[in-house]
Image (cartoon, rainbow, N blue to C red):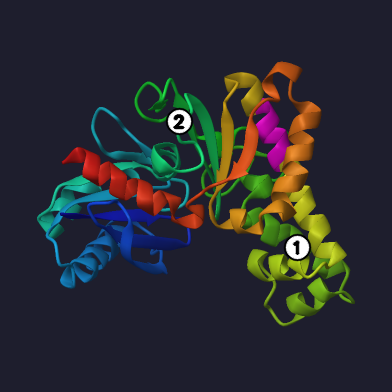
Amino acid sequence: MAVIGIDVGGTKIAAGRLGTDLCVERSVVIPTPHGGIKIVDAIAALCADLGSDSTAPITAIGVGLPATIDAVTGRVAHSVHTGMVDFDAAGPLETRTGLPVVLDNDANLALLAEHRMGAAEGSQTALLLTLGTGVGGGIVIGGQIFRGGRGHGAELGHICVDGDGPPCQGDCPGHGCLETMCSGTAITRDLRAFAAVNPNTALGALHAVGKLDSRSGLALARDGDSDALQVFAGAGRWLGVGVASLCNAFDPDVVVIGGGVSDAGEVILGPARKEYLARALPPTRRAEVVRATFGHEAGMVGAGILAADAI
């Protein structure tokens, strides 16, 4: 038996084939097209590719989307990053592949992976934030994923940490959301803003040739560039503000940080922990803030687990 896990992000789709031990046997990453049908077409093609050389039959497909999924209808209610609104993603995909398809929010699935066999394993109450193009969120309460009244809950990336901050991404009406303060998109924005007024710096040199983004900025930060470190520390502090508020609200056992930006490790997690400990109420400072075990693959692995659970 094998299943396919699909993690749809704002900029890329990661797809993996998982065997009976739920370990990834093979994975593929492609850019995310915009629009529901184009995304369904891309996923169908990925599933055909991953199934073509499988020694075991593919039995189900799990898909994580950066979206709220209506728990009653099973449709995608809304997605800031993909253009899906009241969209049936599972139906067309089942028709294309001939396989059962299960959907959930991408961050919920990342937390499912971490709670089942990763950094949050064994916890009764846990939070996860995925830092990528945007910021996703997931909550475990009483050992179960919390989804809200109709499946729309735990959009933790859209909690407000700065009411007068920059406008949020896509069609989110908020300002100063966590997503717009510490996502990969936000870090790229802040790196470029610094470089624009400081051209005689390493960041300025990268910006001048159009090669400055969160990844190239992180490479400089790891090499000890003080300007890049300052920008990442700023994002980390905003992350810590959000973590403190969430810990005050939920008193979790652990806070897991995943997504591509988590590759920054202590460059961003160090400042985040310091801010969280300075701001959280004393009884809710007990949670460890840790990096996801599965890193940027957590959503893909969680989608595979969802598919395996469904059968």
For the residues labelled 1 and 2, the Cα–Cα distance comes to 38 Å
Q: Position of residue 257 (x, y in %)?
A: 58, 44
Between 168 and 200, the residue placed more toward the observer is 200
- Quarter of the figure with the N terminus: bottom left
Residue in view at x 27 percent, y 51 percent: 21
Residue in view at x 60 percent, y 32 percent: 159
Q: Which mark is residue 122?
A: 2
Q: Amino acid at mark 2?
A: Gly
- Label 1 Cα neighbours within 10 Å, binned few <14 / some 14-19 / many ≥20: many
Q: Which residues are magenta?
A: 239-245
Q: Is residue 83 visible?
A: no
Q: Earlier in the sequence, mark 1 or mark 2?
A: 2
Q: Position of residue 96 (x, y in %)?
A: 14, 59
Q: Quadrant of residue 107?
A: top left
Q: Quadrant of residue 26?
A: bottom left
Q: Is residue 26 visible?
A: yes
Between 202 and 180, the residue placed more toward the observer is 202
Q: Secondary structure at mark 1?
A: helix
**Is residue 240 inside the magenta stretch?**
yes
Kindly report which numbered mark, 1 or 2, lies closer to the viewer in this rendering: 2
Q: Quadrant of residue 40?
A: bottom left
- Horizontal side, residue 171 vs residue 190: left or right: left
Give the residue at mark 1: 191
Q: Main secondary structure of the magenta part?
A: helix
